[in-house]
Amino acid sequence: MEKIALFPGSFDPFTVGHKSLMDRALPLFDKIIIGVGINHEKANFFPLEKRIQWINDLFKDEPRIEVMTYEGLTVNFCDHVNATYILRGLRTSADFEFERAIGQTNKAIHPKIETIFLLTHPEHTFISSSIVRDVYKHGGDIQGFLPKGMNLDL
């Protein structure tokens, strides 16, 4: 059976932390689907099409990574794409508490799906998409927070 993981998020934008997690998770799975979640109640900053394009460009040479969008429950999307793992990154203890609650809820809804947590590298602990957006909105240089080669050409 193929080991397929879903890495869900809004990726608004995709950061060096996200890229690091993907690079480290690739040896663990046969395929990773980066699921860009669509939440109509959440105001995203960067257009969905651009976020998908940026991620696709980053992984254009990696056939085991696929980028897809989805709406609704993450576990339902896992069923749709035959993913039996949900991959999540942990930066802080607050992330752990939040992600643990979601992981346990997902497990209660769909017992066959396992949530896998990877710790971020220490140098990425402070980087979050919301902080990167804030720096960007105020004219700051965010290139150090983005994967090499990713250019936010809007």
Image: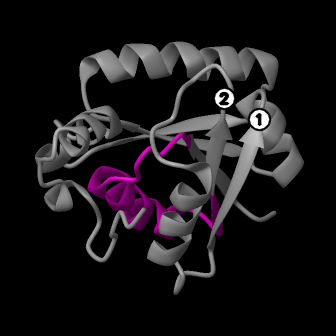
- The residue located at (15%, 46%) in the rendering is 139
22 up-or-down from 35: above or below: below
* Residue depicted at 73% across the width and 36% down the height: 113
Q: Is 54 drawn above or below residue 127 in the view shown?
A: below
Q: Quadrant of the C terminus?
A: bottom left
- Give me the residue at 26% from left, 73% from top: 148
Residue for badge 2: 39
Q: Determine whether label 2 and label 1 are within 8 Å by CB.
A: yes
Q: Position of residue 35 (x, y in %)?
A: 64, 49
Q: Amino acid at mark 2?
A: Asn
Residue 71 placement: quadrant: top right
- Mark 2–mark 1 distance (CA, rounded to whole Å): 7 Å
Query: In screen coordinates, is 141 left or right of 32?
Result: left
Q: Is residue 27 left or right of residue 95?
A: right
Element type at mark 2: loop
The image quarter containing residue 9 is top right
**Residue 120: x and y, percent?**
27, 45
Circle on res. 71: 1
Q: Find residue 36 and report its horizontal and vertical position in percent.
A: 62, 47
Left or right, residue 106 beside residue 116: right
Q: Most extreme residue toward the right, as rendered?
A: 80
The image shows residue 18 at horizontal and vertical percentages of 38, 52
Label 2 vs 1, first from the N-terminus: 2
Query: Which residue occupies the foreground of this view, 82 or 148?
Result: 148
Please provide the residue range marked out in magenta. 9-33
Residue 26 in the magenta stretch? The answer is yes
